[in-house]
Amino acid sequence: MLELFNRRARTMEPAELVGRIEPEDVISLEQRWLPPMRAKIEELRKAGTLTREEVTRWNVADAHWEWPAKVRDRVGQLQWASHALRCGGDTQGLIFMNLVYKCRLPQQLKQHMVYVDLVSTAPWNRPRLVPNPMYGGVGMILVTEAIIRSLDEGFEGRIGLHSLPGAESLYREKFKMDCLGPDPACGNLLYFEMTPQQAAALLPSTAS
Amino acid sequence: MNSKHRPDRQWYARMIQETLDDDFIVGPAFDAKPKDAATAEQPLTVAFGLLVRFSRRAKRLSVEELAEKLSVEADELQHVERDPEFRARPRTISKVANFLDLPVGEVMKLAGAAVSNDASFNANALKFAAHSDDMAALSSAEQEALKSFVRYLRNQE
């Protein structure tokens, strides 16, 4: 059973990982996630500080990702896998993974991997956006799910992702992923890849 | 979501505490242009590998069992299924085509042993290549994708 950390109650709470993003998750996103994120974007626009740095500082880069359209377009395409993470009666996090991307790291060039395309957590869980965030662990569970999917697919834990500036140190230092530098095809975001060895070190139970 | 690879509760609890204030958000930057579709760079051989893999799984055969039926090396079949850069021998391609009851010429094009200048053929193959999964049994969506692509190949004759 998966659990999230309720920061307010200081306890672990049961969470449900749903096999694919469902309509109720999209409704939650449209009705409850987006309004505070868009309000922050508008606030930055009015203040004349709508820059990548400020959007990163407030952790609202995903306000324009158009999750509902992506869910609609990608449903039924086997190259895409998704999950919703629910807890406390609401959707707390979403992930989209692609299963046809190939590795770029020389030591695993063109090997199959799971590419982490989008990961978002509900705005009320974001320490930099709200003063008293609700749940901790949403992003960690979702990114770990990509590694687990990679292992299940026989891709040996290989994953790849483009990190937003605020998450670079996490993927480099805590997940120990290899950084291949800025990717001009992706807004110069840093591109990271995990090798089977790094996956085994992170999830010790996979070493067997 | 069952998986034998899932860590235990203690691992999750520890990792949550270690990353409590980290951002995990992944996706395009606020001012980035949309990325190209992932499938744009897929060669036709991806579709060939997938055709062999899906067909093998639909018949519930292991790589070794199919290799034996085709009288080819299991290693070669493994490469066909997994490595888009690998170019199978014409004899192997021919055996695969006969085994799947598909037109040899079309399968040759798919496997990179013959040139395909047919945009419609390429588009259909790439559409099929966008399907990817490796579960033990084919899902209904995979079965439909496979049947549809096999129908298309047969109609090319």
Image (cartoon, coloured by chain):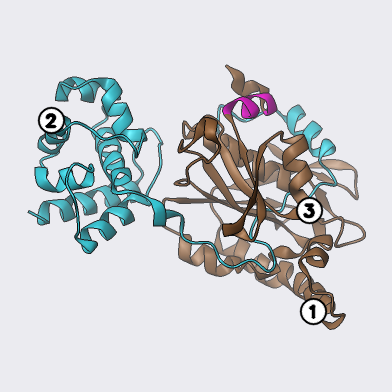
Letter of the chain shown brown in the rendering: A
Q: Position of residue B80 (x, y in %)?
A: 29, 33
Kindly identify which residue carries mark 1. A42
Letter of the chain shown cyan in the rendering: B
Whether A66 is drawn above or below B71: the answer is below
Asked which quadrant contains residue A23, the reply is bottom right
Q: Residue at x 71, y 70 (%)?
A: A34
- Do the CB atoms of the residues marked 3 and 2 lie less than 8 Å apart? no
- Do the CB atoms of the residues marked 2 and 1 lie less than 8 Å apart? no
Q: Position of residue A113 (x, y in %)?
A: 51, 39
Q: Which residues are magenta?
A: A196-202
At label 1, the amino acid type is Glu
Quadrant the N terminus of chain A occupies = top right
> What chain is tagged by disc 3?
A
CA–CA distance in space, label 2 to label 1: 63 Å
Asked which quadrant contains residue A192, the reply is top right
Kindly identify which residue carries mark 3. A166
